[in-house]
Amino acid sequence: MNTVNKVALVTGAGVRVGNVIARRLADSGASVAVHYRNSEDEARGFAAEINAAGGRADTFRAELTDRSQAETLIPAVIDRFGSLDILVNSASVFRDRWLEQTDDADWDENFAVNVTAPFVLSRAMARHLDGKPGKIISLTDWKTTRPKRFAYGVSKAALGGLTRSLAAALAPSIQVNEVALGAILLPVTAAPDEDAALSEKLASRTPLGRLGTPEEVAQVVMTLIENDYITGETIYVDGGQRLSRT
């Protein structure tokens, strides 16, 4: 798919990896719907920057734990831009909680943001396209069996299953893929004085010996958008971390 004059919605696009993906899409000629939950200042500043440079961007707030808000997001984007061709599910819940710490609220929040929202958004987009070409990319994780982040890992595994099921159900018009991330950015919960030690620890577990970058993730997302003969696939951007036993 040529992204020039296409419309892309990136969830969680105010900050971090989602923001870099949104920037790459804007730079490639797409109009960008910048979804955010709490990062209003960052999202609005980013959209203003894109518009000042001659692109098209607008911000959309939605609390994805609230299904009713997720259901209004796609219509709002279409009302603003007139269409929707690309969906990138980047928004995510990520926190340290073992099984015994995982209560119903934590479980429900992870599944609402990491699984239900991508389902609701993908279904609404497919209904809008009604057989016309489209792209759906979801960001998952290289490792879904995570006892320390129990609900997160299970929900990301479910998102991978959703990706493959959507790929089969929406073929041939819409290609659906996932990008499974390794160590890209440090968790937002990491204390500043722990950053260097944590970076070194994560890098030591990665065959390529370093953390990845959001730009490297965005590059893979763009490849999947531009290639029309890949669907139902998982592309790992993990520096080979899944190959390591450590």
Image (cartoon, rainbow, N blue to C red):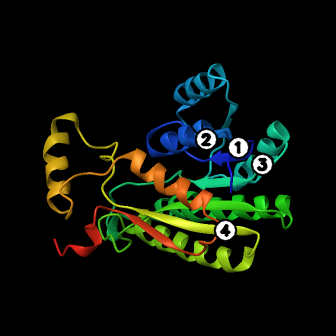
Dot 3 or dot 4: first in sequence order is: 3
Q: Where residue 19 sits in the image (x, y, percent)?
A: 51, 39
Give the left or right position of residue 234, taking residue 201 as reference: right
Q: Nearer the viewer, mark 4 or mark 2?
A: 2
Residue 28 - label: 2
Residue at image point 84% right, 67% down:
131
For the N terminus, give its image quadrant: bottom right
What is the CA distance from the residue labelled 1 to the residue labelled 3?
A: 25 Å
Dot 1 or dot 2: first in sequence order is: 1
For the C terminus, give its image quadrant: bottom left
Give the left or right position of residue 206, taking residue 15 as reference: left
- Label 4: which residue? 175
Q: Where residue 245 sits in the image (x, y, percent)?
A: 18, 76
Residue at image point 56% right, 57% down:
113
What is the CA distance from the residue labelled 1 to the residue labelled 4?
A: 18 Å
| Residue placed most toward the observer, 72 or 227 | 227
Q: Amino acid at mark 2?
A: Ser
Residue 72 - label: 3
Give the left or right position of residue 1, taking residue 23 as reference: right
- Label 1: which residue? 4
Dot 1 or dot 3: first in sequence order is: 1
Q: Amino acid at mark 1?
A: Val
Q: Where residue 25 sits in the image (x, y, percent)?
A: 60, 43
